Image: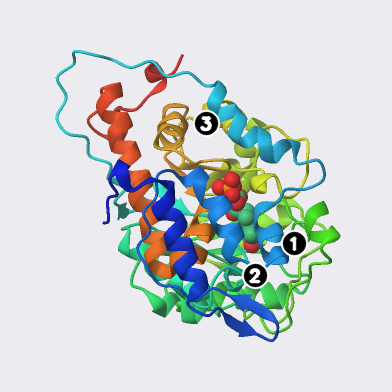
Amino acid sequence: MTQKSAEAGPAKAAKAATTAKAEAPASVAGYRQPTGEETLSIVNLNDLEAEAAKVLPKGGFAFISSGADNQVTLRDNLAAFERIQLRPHYLVGKPAPETKVTLFGQELTLPVITAPMGAHGLAHASAELGTARGTAVAGTLMTVSTAANKTLEDVASASTGPKWFQLYLQEDQGKSRELIQRAEKAGYSAIVFTIDAFAPGSSDEANRLGFSFPPSLPFANTGTATFKPSLTWEDVDFIKETTDLPLILKGVLSPDVAEKAIKRGVNGIQVSNHGGRQLDGVQAAIDALPAVAGAVKGRVPVIMDGGVRRGTDVFKAIALGANAVALGRPVLYGLALGGAKGVESVYGQLQAELVRTMTIAGTANIAEISRKYVL
Ligand SMILES: Cc1cc2nc3c(=O)[nH]c(=O)nc-3n(C[C@H](O)[C@H](O)[C@H](O)COP(=O)(O)O)c2cc1C
């Protein structure tokens, strides 16, 4: 894993971005995809957004970066992390921190995984294949979206790293069954059922720019982006009956949904508001986490996503009851700026920050991070 030194500075990050641009973006019928492959010097993950804006077509950048409506939830996902205060434990004589975790039997280098995101082709010519390679080299897990630009089979063979398949349920039950069976056959180790989205995220900025998905970047698994327009608990039963793979429910914001899900046989809970891209005005994901984790009571793993940008954010989420967090936009920015190596650099930075946080807070491993480390 590539660790960056602090002296690299924004100038160097900017240089990497410029280089990526200079390497003649691939033009897929008018959509200019970056093609650069390079390790990035990252000072922090927040900086990546402005750098990615320089190398991405305006519409693609707006689609990736924006939130829904007034973007209140998008902003609050970040602001809520800043409101949480840490409580370090000093003079406790801990060894160098170990960030490894085991999630559904799979050992990961750090408790951070790649969140499911559609259309990685908007970020880079390698699309989901680059993300899969970068995530695997970082030693962690990728969740592959139904709305990927590469087929789930091609993403599965792009790397040997562990992968989950995120399911957008299709109106035609046969098509959903087919997707689940394809994922099983291709070696995916869990199904993530997203319950909070009925269409791709719509943002004012993307609409202002007249953004639409380039026909040259099709949704490789389904042809077009299709969603079942109404979801019920029977849909959860259907997935459970269709597969023996662990089922993770993504988009949980309340303890009662978590409780019902576990009673229904769901094997994991992902606390998420879809990165503020769906219903604007809902609670920040990190604010929803403690009550959900309280209801789950350790019966199944809890994953949290939305606004994770710092090692301290990862630490806070674990302290408040998550077993792991999922990373969204920063992964796509890393991909845009440096392909698979850019994704690896993003994880390298987060890993280094997490180690630094754990060292100062006084925790030797992830299991030690608990409620007593937050106020
Ligand atoms: C461009 C983009 C596409 C996304 N597509 C999906 C998707 O196909 N399925 C899904 O469950 N979530 C999707 N999400 C939501 C992410 O899984 C995740 O909840 C969110 O990005 C986390 O917030 P963060 O970007 O602040 O880290 C998408 C997010 C982005 C930014």
Type of amino acid under label 1: Pro
Residue 293's disc number: 3
Q: Are marks 1 and 2 in contact (CB under 8 Å)?
A: yes
Mark 1 lies within 8 Å of ligand 1 (Cβ measured) = yes
Q: Secondary structure at mark 3?
A: helix
**Residue at 22% from the left image edge and 30% from the top image edge:** 364
Colour basis:
rainbow
The answer to whether residue 248 is visible is no
* Residue 21 in picture, x, y percent from top left: 52, 71
What distance separates the C-alpha of mark 3 from that of mark 2?
29 Å
**Residue at 28% from the left image edge and 41% from the top image edge:** 99
Question: In this rendering, would 205 be left or right of 237?
Answer: right
Q: Earlier in the sequence, mark 3 or mark 2?
A: 2
* Residue 263 in picture, x, y percent from top left: 59, 41
**Residue at 43% from the left image edge and 47% from the top image edge:** 10
- Residue position marked by numbered label 1 in the rendering: 200
- Location of residue 89 by image quarter: top left
User: Which is nearer the eye, 23 or 83?
Assistant: 23
* Residue 163 in picture, x, y percent from top left: 43, 65
> Crowding near pointer 1: few (<14 within 10 Å), some, many (20+)?
some
User: Which is nearer the eye, 210 or 116?
Assistant: 210
